Amino acid sequence: MNKTIQTVESAAAGSAFLIEDVYPSIDGGRFAVKRIAGERVEVWADIYRDGDAVISAALIWRGEQDREWRSEPMTPDGNDRWSGAFTPQEPGQYVYAIEAWTDEFATWSHGIARKQRTGADVSLDAIEGAGLLTKAHGGRQDAAAVIIRQCEDYLQSGDVAPLLSAELGKAMAESQSRPDLTRSPPFPLIVDRDKARFGACYQMMPRSQSRIPGRHGTLRDCIARVPDLAAMGFDVLYLTPVHPIGRTRRKGRNNAPVATDREPGSPYAIGSADGGHDALHPELGTIEDFRALVATCLEYGLELALDFAVQCSPDHPWLTQHPEWFKWRPDRSVRTADGPYSDIVIPDFASVDRVGLWNAFRDAMLFWIDHGVTIFAIDNHDTAPLPFWDWLIGDIRRRHPGVILFSKTFAKPKLMKGLAKLGFAQSFTYFPWRTTKWELEQYLGELTRYPERDFYRPNLFVNTPDLLPYHLQSGETWMFKSRVALAATLSSSFGIYSGFELLEHEAVPGREEYLDSEKYQIRQRDWDKPGNIKAYIAALNGIRKDNAALQQTANLRFLGIEDGETIAFAKEAADSTNTVLAVIALSRHVREFWLPLGGLTIDAGGERCHVAALENLLTGEQSRIEWGGIRLRIDPDRDPALLFRCLA
């Protein structure tokens, strides 16, 4: 095994301290930990050195672009484990590190105290301690005054007592030199605003918002829908691409390979003679209409999210303006995507002018940020390399720390986690395919354990324009309610694609895809169609907003319940002031069961105690806990979810 040869000089100059097992850190500090602005960042580490010298340690932190470090003390928790915390108040990119040093004066104080207890002569030790005072520097003025006063008292009286005062020890701790100060490597930290942790998304296809059959919807039609979305409790309006759509190889109804002249094509085939990624599809309206939509959303408490796809149609202006950004076949035709995606072209992210291409996509995103978009849902990550996403996320964060980038890919598990490590603030999950009790418990357990909970924020979408899960294809009301209740309570961020609230469930036979998908055609709907579950979704969102426990995902605990078709879990707020219990049916039949709560405790005035009662969050009815649990009844046809506030 190769080992670097170490000289005496290099060994002697090495650090006296070992700083190990730092938490939180992702892959040893290679990737950033994620937190929310105003949230305490608690840090632990093993810090030790040889001998019995007294150690001091500090947690230092700063904004990535700042020069000055801020410092917070760390305290020992036993067995060389130290802890500290700091609280960044603004979104942005930060770094933190740990410093350790020998507190020479405290080491001297401890040594002389031991000698005094044995009755030994400490006169020489006192002289050595006074000598340490003369080397003090750099402290505050009041600390310097304490050092001078205590030194004079010792010199005048010859009594060691002034040198052992707690006041002097504190003054020397900040004023003495630190010749063996050791600093750990820096660890990156991403701080997002609260929307990255908590929100409810409603995704829609803008062109399908008109109420007039056969008419292409506009942004003004989208504006008309905002009050309805706000009434359902959504706080993010998420639009599919709004850009001009290409005509070459345009797809027809149900992804037919050839479209008729009247068919609108897929909005994901971006670009035509009318413009590219920084242009609006003409039939949607004008940029002034877009600004009006942003303003209306803000008026009703919603933010605007936009799909951002790094792909082009063969008609995108870039193909003629920058042919070097694309791959061309021997017959001089552009290389299109394979199979069902032949209406799009994938740019060559390794082209000779990759800098120009990368900057062009970044500039398109900046264009929409300037027009009020605050959240981007990134589509089709596999069309671009990981270094591109790493660069784009970092560049946008530095310019606009409040902008949220959402990874909406169903890729392989490690790739999904890798993208989250690169900095995406939220990520899609496999929730649509987790239907049984053990699957849900295992998967959410995975996402809320360490280290995943420090970098992966799950957004549980129940359906998407591309995905109609098999369990929804029966169209049963209880199933739609069960799935949205699971999504809204298991995670603090969830979303639906328009039509879910109307129980839309017609599928392509044998596939998890919508029949007559509006990806390839314009649809009109009666948004108040009888049988809709809009009121149910509104009630769920109201409960989420009233209970801090449901506004986070990490503090999740599954409860043991013998019924294999019912799942039960508790969530506790970060500040422990609110705990919610959810019991949700996973099948349709009525059931009664015993829910044990013996091991569940909640905060009561700073002390932990067992749950004494449950308050139904829909009815307000309270039930006492007896014999460590409660008997419950669920009728899924009425409501597949029981939600309770835990009371002490």
Image (cartoon, helix red, strand yellow):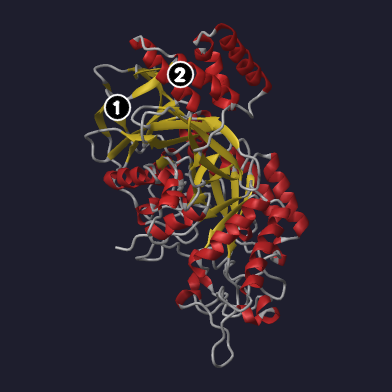
Q: Residues within 10 Å of mark 2 (few under 14, many from 20)?
A: some
Q: Where is residue 549 in the image (x, y as percent from the top left)?
A: 46, 31
Q: Can residue 563 be seen in this view?
A: yes
Relative to 524, residue 164 above or below? above
Which amino acid lies under the numbered mark 1 shown in the image of this protein?
Leu
Looking at the image, which is closer to me, 581 or 448?
448
Is 634 displayed left or right of 573 in the figure?
left
Relative to 630, residue 358 above or below? below
**Alpha-carbon span between mark 1 and mark 2:** 72 Å
Name the residue at 42% across, 52% down: 429
Is 20 displayed left or right of 243 in the figure?
left
Q: What element carries label 2?
A: helix
Please, which residue is most extreme toward the right here? 288
Is 604 displayed left or right of 397 in the figure?
left
Looking at the image, which is closer to me, 7 or 432?
7
Provide the residue designation for mark 1.
632
Q: Where is residue 563 in the image (x, y as percent from the top left)?
A: 23, 36
| Mark found first going from the N terminus, 1 or 2 | 2
Name the residue at 38% across, 48% down: 476
Looking at the image, which is closer to me, 314 or 106?
106
Which label number is shown at residue 463? none
Please, which residue is most extreme toward the left here? 562
Provide the residue designation for mark 2.
125
Looking at the image, which is closer to me, 487 or 398?
398
Please, which residue is most extreme toward the top here? 157
CB contact under 8 Å: marks 1 and 2:
no
Which amino acid lies under the numbered mark 2 shown in the image of this protein?
Asp
Relative to 354, residue 103 above or below? above
Quarter of the image where the N terminus is located: bottom left
Name the residue at 40% across, 20% down: 111
Q: Position of residue 249 (x, y in %)?
A: 56, 80
Relative to 435, residue 272 above or below? below
